[in-house]
Amino acid sequence: MAQAQVIRAAEGERYGPASPLFKHGSLTGAPFDFLVVNMDYLSGPPLHVHELQHDTFYVVEGVLTVQIADEVIELKPGDFASVPPGVPHTFDNTRKDQPPVKLCNVMTPGGLDAFFVKLTEDGTPPDPAKFAAVGAQCGMTFVGPPLAVRLGLTK
């Protein structure tokens, strides 16, 4: 019989100072990763595709801008978006006047933490080539720029 798991608020893994708090499957025993993200202005990833993972977002505080395929939408508190494998997507806090956007991100199946482990294990800062190489190892392909570039935003 499977054992229930309780993971406290401060428990989880961070893979760098700006990393979200992962409550990943290897920690929880669950078949998914659960991330608590406080997204700073223009800190989102490039447009990407997951080979196997369903990427789901639930906004707790603030407005999150999400690109799914070619459509750009804004998610407000209580809004939910789910992106199936193979669909290009990205997300970001594109409002300079708001504090970090708080969101929950669920990846099914789990395993996204492997990307961050590999990205940070050699201690060198990530660059686009490193993102692409590590992403390919982890079933993720980068297919376009971050939203800041698409929307012409600067810090």
Image (cartoon, rainbow, N blue to C red):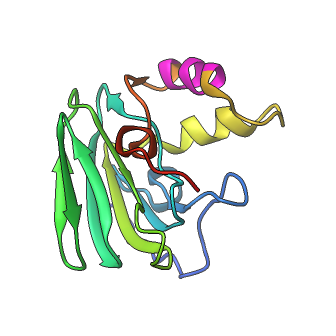
Judged left or right of residue 50, residue 125 is: right
Q: Quadrant of the C terminus?
A: bottom right
**Frontmost residue, 60 versus 42:** 42
Q: Residue at x 29, y 29 (%)?
A: 52
Image coordinates of residue 80 in percent, x first then y, are 18, 65
Residue 126 lies in the magenta-colored region: no
Q: Quadrant of the N terminus?
A: bottom left
**Frontmost residue, 17 versus 29:** 17
Judged left or right of residue 98, residue 69 is: left
Judged left or right of residue 49, residue 38 is: right
Image coordinates of residue 141 in percent, x first then y, are 41, 22
Q: Where 45 falls versus 36 (above or below)?
A: above
* Quarter residue 64 falls in: bottom left
Image coordinates of residue 148 in percent, x first then y, are 44, 46
Q: Residue at x 33, y 31 (%)?
A: 50
Residue 132 lies in the magenta-colored region: yes
Q: Where 13 falls versus 130 (above or below)?
A: below
- What's the magenta region? 129-136
